[in-house]
Structures are given as C-alpha cells and as structure tokens.
Amino acid sequence: MAIRLAKYIAQNGYCSRKQASRLIEIGAVQVNNRAANHIDHIEPSDIVTIFGEVLPQLTKHHYFAFYKPIGIDCKLLQHDPTSLLHLLPKDIRLFPVGRLDKDSHGLILLTTDGDFYHQLNHPEHHQEKEYLVTVNKTLTAEFQNKMASGGIPIKDKLTQPCQVQIINEQQFKITLTQGLNRQIRRMAKYLGYYVTDLKRIRIAELLLTKLELKEGEMVEIDKDMLNKKP
C-alpha cells in the first residue's frame, strides 16, 4: 500500500511528520531522483533521499526508556559535547519524545517512530508526567494549593490544574499533562521557591523505579508498556 511521503519519512524514523513536511517544502527530499511533492505516495520500490542520503526502510520500530543524567542536553547536536546524541546507539536513528532540561534528570523516551513521537508530543494527547522535586525552603499548604490550582503565568500562557503531593519539608511530587518550557522551575519561582533538584519519575504508566535504570542507562521497551498500570 502506498504511503503519503511525509508519513513515510516519519514512520521510517527520520523525524516527525511535521518536520518531514518542512523538509519537502525546502526541497531537501527527492523521490526516485526527482524533487519530491507533498502529494507523493511512496511504494516499497521507491527510493527516497533526504539531503542526498537514501532513507533506509525500517522493518521494525524501536522504543527505549532512558535515564537522562544531569548535564545532558536533549537537543541532538553533533557539535555539542553535552548533547544526548553522543550517548545514543550509532546504528539506529533515535530521537527523544519530549525533553528534560539540562539541569534535570530522570526518565525520557527515545524512538525511531516519528508517528509515535508526534502522537505523544501533541498537546491534545494529555500524557501524564510525574516529577519528584526538591526546593530550597520549607513547603506550605499555600504553596501546594497554588501549584495545583493552575493559573500561574509562564510567558504568554497560564498553567493548568495539576496534582501536587508534599513528601517532606522540602520535597514534593507533581503530575503534569501540560508541557511548558521549564514549567515546574518557573512555577516554583513565581511562588518564591528555587528548585534544587528535579527528577522525572513517570511517563504515562511507565515508572522509572520499575525499570531499575542507573543514570545514563537505557532499555528497550514495548510501546504497549506505556498503557499498562504501574
């Protein structure tokens, strides 16, 4: 069955479908040695090249859970020695589903599946992510209520209601479905707190503790594990 070109590129793990459309737009993609069009549909016998390199056909997609250490940047930049790219296998093209900022650590997902990447990163997917957060001073019920209630301004957006549980004097858990840039750190700062440690411990139903990973380690998972109860 023929597959629309952008979807084909995403399914073969090169990038997301949206990014594939941009590559087609700028003329970086060819099909059978001619300039590609958005309306192209790809058959198994077709040869697709991106920036002059042949896009290999994947027979199987890969999904990994990875424990990102502090100091590693999730941007896949070859010239950056702190880039996550340098910790990934060289034989397959993996990219992160969602990101953790450089100063944070914990669970991230990696995949070759562009459609899966797009699905989990879409704002309407409401993927739960849970974090263990340490701050610089004693937590209060007022802090908990304001964090959980939503409405905290972050640039031009407001935070949505979320779940917040105080663990001890300076540590709490927070579960988000929203994914604003450095959201937890900015929420805490708005309320007069400074985050000293931030660790992602769960994505959907996938728990970091059950994976038994050390920092810098990764394990291949079944995509269906994201839908299982912890």
Image (cartoon, rainbow, N blue to C red):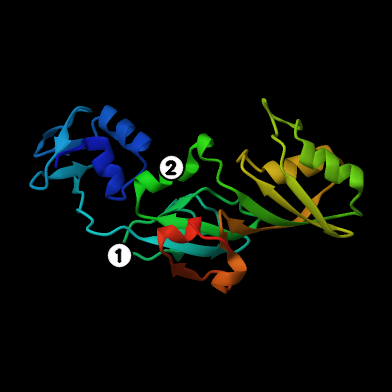
Is residue 26 visible to the viewer in this orientation of the structure?
no
Q: Nearer the viewer, residue 169 or 29?
A: 169
Give the answer, above or below, for where 117 lies relative to 109: above
Q: In the image, is 95 to the left or to the right of 153?
A: left
| Residue sitting at the far front | 229
Q: CA distance from mark 2 to mark 1?
A: 24 Å
Q: Residue furthest top?
A: 156
> Residue 107's x, y, as percent?
57, 60
Query: Going 55% across and 46% down the picture, which residue do you hit?
Result: 127
| SS for dot 2 | helix
* Residue labelled with disc 2: 119
Quadrant containing the C terminus in the rendered view: bottom right
Query: 220 or 124: nearer the eye?
Result: 124
Q: Look at label 2 and name its amino acid.
A: Gln
Label 1: how many residues lie within 10 Å, few (<14), some (14-19) or many (20+)?
few
Callout 1: SS: loop
Q: Is residue 104 or residue 203 the one in the foreground?
A: 203
Name the residue: 44% across, 62% down.
64
Of mark 2 and mark 1, the one earlier in the sequence is 1
The mark found on residue 91 in the picture is 1
Front position among marks 2 and 1:
2
Above or below residue 188? Residue 85 is: below
- For disc 2, the neighbor class at 10 Å (few under 14, some 14 to 19, many from 20) is some
x then y, percent, for residue 89: 37, 66
Q: Position of residue 227 (x, y in %)?
A: 49, 55
| Residues at marks 2 and 1 touching, judged by CB atoms closer than 8 Å | no
Residue appearing at x 38%, y 56% in the figure: 94
Nearest to the observer: residue 89 or residue 191: 191
- The disc labelled 1 sits on which kind of residue? Asp
User: Quick one: quadrant of the N terminus?
Assistant: top left
Q: Is 87 on the left or on the right of 49, as rendered?
A: right
